[in-house]
Image (cartoon, coloured by chain):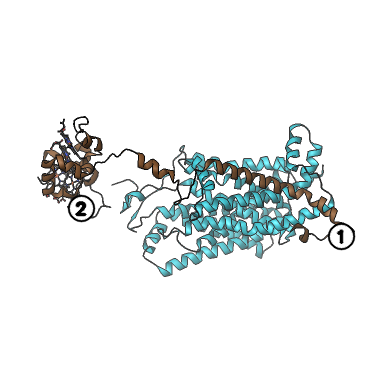
Chain colours: A cyan, B brown
């Protein structure tokens, strides 16, 4: 008997091939897509209230996007070979095509939008700074210091267009991650056309929550007054997207339960045993129902500012945990049962391994480090930029 | 595209629009330059005629063809080892190829005197196919080797070429 294995398991199913890092991957790309969509709310849908988070959201998206491929690279035994995907891509491979979606999104959407939005600041800093930083900003101006009102108006128009293109791109970016799982027909836990949509909405939910947290944190660090109208509006959007996300997931669940195909007993058993904690308790109870209740309460009643802040903070933190648990349950859950539906295995996270816990923690810290660097390089606060 | 999106005030001439949107050319140039560098690197590093017959290097076919042959095929073995061939044909291993147990022996078949093969390591050989595993078809003969053999080597009871006792 192999420890951790119950019932009948095919030999190649006993050890999980996709571990913690593959859980991180959709989590991180989800944050990118979510943060970007929040930024585009302000830009395209003219939601003025979330203005203070616009630049913050763009920088968050960039910081996480830069880290997004790293879990996959670390997962590969031969990371250098991932370049082959760009050099000789196979059109029938979703993963290969995804590489191009990633590049498109990084260069044509995100970098361009940030550049257009920051151009005025970059040019000003290229003139006001000295030494090495001056060179950096000079390089960032790409050699043009034309920030006349007319040029800025053009930038604004072009930036708007880029954002409009960016929304479907962000949807594609994360829909694709869901697509990769949803199209694995051998795995009933993954194989559903709902997967890309569920991933998309959970991405938006987690991204909005992340920007909300980063906004609250940056306000604390910078000691600037918090914009409660902004916070309330983000809270409202978080509530809406989370509600849609939850509805979709429940739809999936109800559908599976009612359909009760040959995989159902096995999946049902798993949810009641090995996934009890991560799915029922972490994801659904703590990670969804509690934050939803907190956010809903804010839609129904008016609380004091201090209370609201605590409620949003708690809701956003729990949301982040809940969405992480959701990724975990999808990726890990999908590998815990046998394709024979007669056996179950277990997954143990290793510590200091290439795909272990330390690596994962490092990968989660890295985007925040990049974020801080970006914020120092391109301060998103108008206060700073006026000095 | 930029010019249709942007409606200039009347007093602005076409020239002004050009100077004011001139900076937009720069990221485009950077992007195109990056794309160009990528294409050059790609042209340099991907193998010649990649994709001629399919999604692989056509030269790979030649390289593989030039590798030395390592398996002789059992028709060869049977020509010289008549006894073993007869023994095997009479038993349950009739359809197990010689080299499935003996390993690749083309060099031996070409020059038997120069390359005398080592005999298989029985302790590990039989296990490879007969160890009990729930994933194997139930009709396939399988034993929990540790319990079944009682620590003796398999060929102290079974004959490898005709495993019947």
- The outermost residue toward the bottom is A258
Q: Nearer the viewer, residue A35 or A301?
A: A35
- A304 left or right, relative to B67: right
Give x and y (percent) for residue A222.
73, 43
Secondary structure state at the residue bearing disc 2: loop
- The outermost residue toward the top is B114
Mark 1 — residue?
Answer: B9
Task: Report whether residue A151 is seen.
Answer: no
Q: Tell me which residue sits at (63%, 45%) in the image.
A: B36
Labels 1 and 2 share a subunit = yes
Task: Report whether residue B92 is seen.
Answer: yes
Q: Nearer the viewer, residue A67 or B122?
A: B122
Q: Which mark is residue A88?
A: none
Q: Compared with residue A275, is residue A256 higher up or lower down, i.e. above or below?
A: below
Q: Compared with residue A198, is residue A369 higher up or lower down, i.e. above or below?
A: above
Q: Compared with residue A131, is residue B62 higher up or lower down, i.e. above or below?
A: below
Give x and y (percent) for residue A83.
53, 44
In this view, the mark in front (1 or 2)? 1
Quadrant of the frame with the N terminus of chain B: bottom right
Mark 2 — residue?
Answer: B140
């Amino acid at each position: 008997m192999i420890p951790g294995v119950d019932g009948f398991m095919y030999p190649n199913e006993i050890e999980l091939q996709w571990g913690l890092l593959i859980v991180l991957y959709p989590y991180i790309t989800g944050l990118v897509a979510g943060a970007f969509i929040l930024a585009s709310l302000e830009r395209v849908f003219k939601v003025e209230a979330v203005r203070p988070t616009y630049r913050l959201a763009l920088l968050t998206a960039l910081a996480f996007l830069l880290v997004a491929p790293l879990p996959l690279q670390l997962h590969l035994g031969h990371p250098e070979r991932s370049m082959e995907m760009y050099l000789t891509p196979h059109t029938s491979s979703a993963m290969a095509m995804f590489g191009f979606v990633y590049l498109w999104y990084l260069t044509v959407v995100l970098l361009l939008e940030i550049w257009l939005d920051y151009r005025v600041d970059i040019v000003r800093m290229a003139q006001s700074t000295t030494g090495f930083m001056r060179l950096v900003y000079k390089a960032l101006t790409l050699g043009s210091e034309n920030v006349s009102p007319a040029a800025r108006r053009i930038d604004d128009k072009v930036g708007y267009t880029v954002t409009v293109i960016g929304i479907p791109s962000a949807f594609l970016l994360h829909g694709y991650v869901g697509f990769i799982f949803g199209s694995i027909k051998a795995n009933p836990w993954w194989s559903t056309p709902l997967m890309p949509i569920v991933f998309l909405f959970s991405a938006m939910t987690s991204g909005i929550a992340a920007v909300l947290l980063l906004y609250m944190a940056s306000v604390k660090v910078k000691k600037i007054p918090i914009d409660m109208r902004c916070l309330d509006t983000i809270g409202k959007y978080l509530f809406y997207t989370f509600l849609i996300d939850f509805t979709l997931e429940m739809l999936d669940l109800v559908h599976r339960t009612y359909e009760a195909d040959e995989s159902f007993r096995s999946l049902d058993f798993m949810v009641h045993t090995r996934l009890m904690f991560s799915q029922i308790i972490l994801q659904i109870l703590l990670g969804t129902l509690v934050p939803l209740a907190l956010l809903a309460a804010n839609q129904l009643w008016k609380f004091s500012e201090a209370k609201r802040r605590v409620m949003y903070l708690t809701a956003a933190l729990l949301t982040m945990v809940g969405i992480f648990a959701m990724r975990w349950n999808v990726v890990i859950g999908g590998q815990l049962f046998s394709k024979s539906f007669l056996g179950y295995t277990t997954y143990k996270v290793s510590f200091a391994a290439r795909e272990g816990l330390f690596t994962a923690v490092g990968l989660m810290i890295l985007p925040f480090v990049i974020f801080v660097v970006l914020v120092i390089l391109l301060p998103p606060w108008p206060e700073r930029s006026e000095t | 595209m930029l010019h249709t999106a942007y409606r200039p005030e009347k007093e602005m001439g076409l020239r002004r629009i050009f100077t004011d949107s001139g900076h937009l050319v720069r990221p485009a140039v950077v992007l195109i330059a990056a794309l160009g560098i990528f294409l050059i690197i790609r042209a340099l590093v991907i193998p010649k005629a990649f994709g001629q017959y399919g999604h692989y290097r056509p030269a790979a076919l030649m390289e593989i063809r030039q590798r030395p042959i390592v398996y002789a095929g059992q028709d060869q073995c049977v020509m010289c080892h008549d006894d073993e061939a007869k023994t095997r044909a009479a038993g349950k291993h009739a359809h197990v190829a010689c080299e499935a147990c003996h390993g690749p022996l083309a060099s031996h078949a070409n020059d038997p005197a120069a390359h005398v093969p080592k005999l298989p390591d029985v302790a590990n050989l039989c296990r490879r196919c007969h160890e009990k595993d729930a994933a194997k078809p139930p009709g396939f003969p399988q034993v929990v080797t540790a319990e079944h053999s009682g620590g003796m080597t398999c060929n102290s009871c079974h004959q490898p070429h005709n495993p019947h006792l």
